[in-house]
Amino acid sequence: MLFSKFFIPTVRETPAEAEAVSHVLMLRAGYVRQLASGLYIYLPLAWKVMNRIMKIIREEMDAIGAQEISMPGLHPADIWQKTGRWSDIGEEMFRLKDRGGRDMCLGMTHEEIITWLASSEIRSYRQLPQMWYQMQAKFRDEARPKSGVLRTREFIMKDSYSFDRDEEGLAESYRKHAEAYHRIYERCGLKFYQVQSDPGMMGGATAHEFMAPSPAGEDMIVLCGKCGYSANTELALSVPPSQKLKGDENPPASRGDSSRQREPSPFVKGGDLEIPPLTKGDKGGFLEDIPTPNRRTVAEVSAFLKADPSCFIKSLLMIGDDGPFLALVRGDQELHEKKLQKIAGNFRPAQKDEVKDILGVEAGFIGPHNNKLKKIADVSLKEGIYIAGANKAGFHTKGVKPHVDFEAEWHDIHVARQGDACAKCGAPVTLEQAIEIGNIFQLGTKYSLPLKAVYLDEGGKEKPIIMGSYGIGPARIAAAAVEQNNDKDGIIWPGSIAPFDIEIIPLDMGEKEIQDTAGAIYRDLGNEGFEVIMDDRDERPGIKFKDADLIGIPLQIVIGKKGLKEGVVELKTRRTKATERVSPADVVRRVKDLFPSLEKRD
RNA sequence: CGGGGCGUAGCGCAGCCUGGUAGCGCGCCUGCUUUGGGAGCAGGAUGUCGGAGGUUCGAAUCCUCUCGCCCCGACCA
């Protein structure tokens, strides 16, 4: 391909609307243009990248026995009504009416449609299992499109669906997909993790996400280097560090009945704030209310009493479907609303006057003792001794002990943090920001039941088909690849998904010798099956170098007067900028040697 | 949906506070020179100042409404 004939509108200056590195580079290097918020045009370079990614995906999907089909992007509403998602999903679904006034929508995903297909075609266990996939546009009226092609309102997704007789079959289809996904991301040259994820609106129990670490990512993932535990913070479990008691180098020792020794004091302010000895058997009587005028938040009371935030109980009054309840987390921890929602169902924080009505005290002084409200407490509060709101205006109570002064349902309802201990093995976990590049869900019968996708087993008994669904966003793979592979000069494509393998840069098209040498190398490499772009423009060398680095083709071949005088051209690796001088006659052989390390085009 | 920012030439921006009819850099076109990291000289083209309404003798500038885009948050099959 000749550069002069290929549409690559590079720009020198960073467009004002771009923030994310991949967005900036894909705009500047002439890969994409924005049509409207969350709508992108893929220019020739980007479309070549997309096609290479989709080819890899197809190969790996076919390899696990999945079959490609194509479904409409425009859907009749009634199928979505049958599964309930027509009403469950809000403004995120594009809805419209056809000329007959029938409700339609643009597909956000295709569970409904493919299940409709399965319901009308699958009759017998003999037809199972099946795996069907497609590469199709998805439409979602995103509340906030952002970061270029990372979050758009229309995007291509590879979505596949498995149909099995039973849970064992589903587990097998799920495993095959997970393995195929690993191969896909590896072949695309991405760094990635597989993490546990929240099934969310998809329903079902088990779900994983594939995450490419990048500061442009919208998710945080929790990783344990020791046991391999990995999960999205949406559901990641962790054990926060122990309560920090003043003057105590070790964690508090109040474990079980054996610890009858004196509790270390969480307070600094000398003897008057010392807590009397407490043991597990004590039934209160050692609580002391201390005045904390106008100190309401943990930070305020913590500073006022000079006690670490981990010595406090944060009590949050929530209004649930079954009435008010208290959510309790340690003062240094943050309540994880999604975790709480899974336990408590729908809830909302109580308003100020509601707090007063229910507890008789204003917010800021509420605590878990002295009231009979239902309580859901974070597990980090199970041990230790605490200061909590006194349920009395202007006072906090010190010496509050879980199990003694209050009881609660215990759950992990805090937000996992860097440095917390792994819930599985106890090693410290790390947090990383990541781009979601794929996900897999075990759906079970969530769609097959309402849409009556059933089969007859050997005994002639009717059973629902057990389903899974699996998605990959090729554009996100491309953007993640750019996020993970770039330098100050531009993109550095992994060889497997680069739009071209090699860019030939003849420095002066006016020189016949340069032109001839470049032309010969261009033809020879093309004949060897490489995809080559030659910058045949009548531009100055500086412009050609800058554009080549921006665009990010893995290997550059620079042909200039200087080199030719010495009988060589230069092979330059985009990633390292390492240059190798090779005689023109040896170029093809040398490139073939080099390419395994650059991932030769398959 | 809440908070913030920005819409002026193809791109990046100044001008707006303090009203007087639009400017800079890059790019683009022509010619000459130049050619190993975004060239030099000379000449040239390009604007519904996002839109509508209002105030005023006069609006890019002040006021009202509106549309669009970006960022933070909420949300996110």
Image (tube, rainbow, N blue to C red):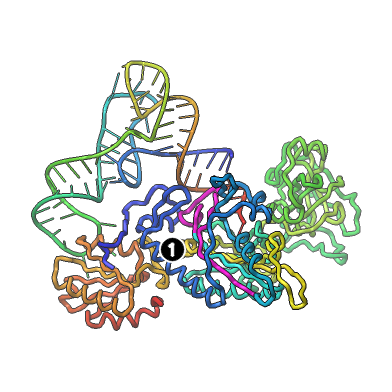
Left or right of A351, for residue A8: left
| Residue A99 lies in the magenta stretch | no
Seen at 26% across and 68% down, the residue is: A534
Q: Residue A424 in the image: state x and y as whole percent.
A: 70, 70
Seen at 71% across and 56% down, the residue is: A339
- Reply above or below: B69 against A134: above
Seen at 33% across and 51% down, the residue is: A13
Left or right of A177, for residue A422: right
> Which amino acid type is marked by label 1?
Val
Mark 1 lies on a secondary structure that is: helix
Q: Considering the image in quadrants, where does the C terminus of chain A appear?
A: bottom left
Tell me which chain the residue with mark 1 is part of. A
Q: Is residue A312 visible?
A: no
Range of magenta residues = A128-155
Left or right of A73, for residue A541: left
Q: Residue B22 in the image: state x and y as whole percent.
A: 26, 32
Q: Nearer the viewer, residue A501 or B17?
A: A501
| Residue A148 lies in the magenta stretch | yes
- Reply above or below: A505 against B4: below
Q: Residue A326 in the image: state x and y as whole percent.
A: 79, 48
Q: Quadrant of residue A113?
A: bottom right
Q: Which residue is mark 1?
A: A482
